[in-house]
Image: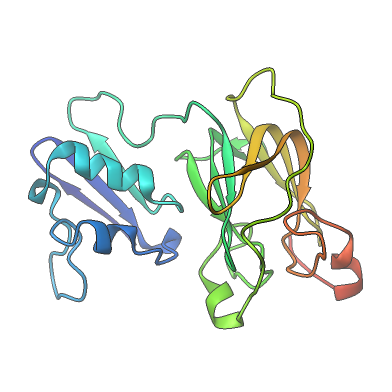
Amino acid sequence: MVETVKGREVTVIFDGSRCIHSRHCVLGHPEVFVPNVKGDWIFPDAAPAEAVLRIGFDCPSGAIRVLRNDGSAGSDAAPVVNTVHVRENGPLALEAPILIRGEAFDTPRATLCRCGQSKRKPFCDGSHAEAGFAATGEPATKASEPLAARNGAVDVLPQPNGPLKVVGNLEIVSGTGRTINRVTQTFLCRCGHSKNKPYCDGSHKAAGFEAE
């Protein structure tokens, strides 16, 4: 279900199907996103417009989008540097102009499943928590050269019964913000079994992983 709430300066769009309950919104600005109430729960005018925009920028899954009512850049603005953050015991948080199998995605933020349990593959649906998925958010740093360009489209190409092939300028970043690799193409594990996470090592074959 998608909810759209227009305030004086900004409009908040919330897509519950994308929410992974990272709780940045309700913990950071409980006056804007009021948890556990019946009826209206999103109040765009309860905080300054810039603070509400920041909520949209900070939402890792793209469930929250915040648009300026005057048409200027909102939280859908493309980042200056394309990144994918490796979340501790959780998904891959991608921030870039995103393509999914060559088709433009509607927001520059998405969380991609890496536990293998999501029912919304290639996107995370929070199943890693129930499954008890355990994987470090601090992989070892790989030697890599600075990219010639750090922006541009990033195409996510789920391989049948295999990893996520990702093509485009991308910095892979640890949970604490450390750049661990710079790539223009990589294969990221999405079965949950690789011993070289976040990268694929072929373990999906022995695990019998199945995904479109």
**Could you say which is closer to the camera, residue 149 or residue 164?**
149
Residue 18 vertical position relative to residue 116 in the rendered view, above or below: above
Q: Position of residue 13 (x, y in %)?
A: 28, 49
The residue at 52%/67% (across/down) is: 125
Q: Residue furthest top?
A: 148
Q: How is the image coloured?
A: rainbow
The residue at 54%/35% (across/down) is: 96
Q: Position of residue 129 (x, y in %)?
A: 53, 77
**Could you say which is closer to the camera, residue 191 or residue 101?**
191
Q: Quadrant of residue 54?
A: top left
Q: Position of residue 57 (x, y in %)?
A: 36, 42
178 vs 69, left or right, is: right
Residue 118 vertical position relative to residue 148 in the rendered view, above or below: below
The residue at 75%/58% (across/down) is: 189
Q: Quadrant of residue 203?
A: bottom right
Residue 173 vertical position relative to residue 15 in the rendered view, above or below: above
92 vs 183, left or right, is: left
Tell me the quarter of the image containing the N terminus.
bottom left
Q: Position of residue 10 (x, y in %)?
A: 18, 38
Tell me the quarter of the image containing the C terminus.
bottom right
The residue at 20%/36% (across/down) is: 50
**Could you say which is closer to the camera, residue 136 or residue 186?**
136
Q: How many marks?
A: 0
109 vs 6, left or right, is: right
Q: Quadrant of residue 88?
A: bottom right
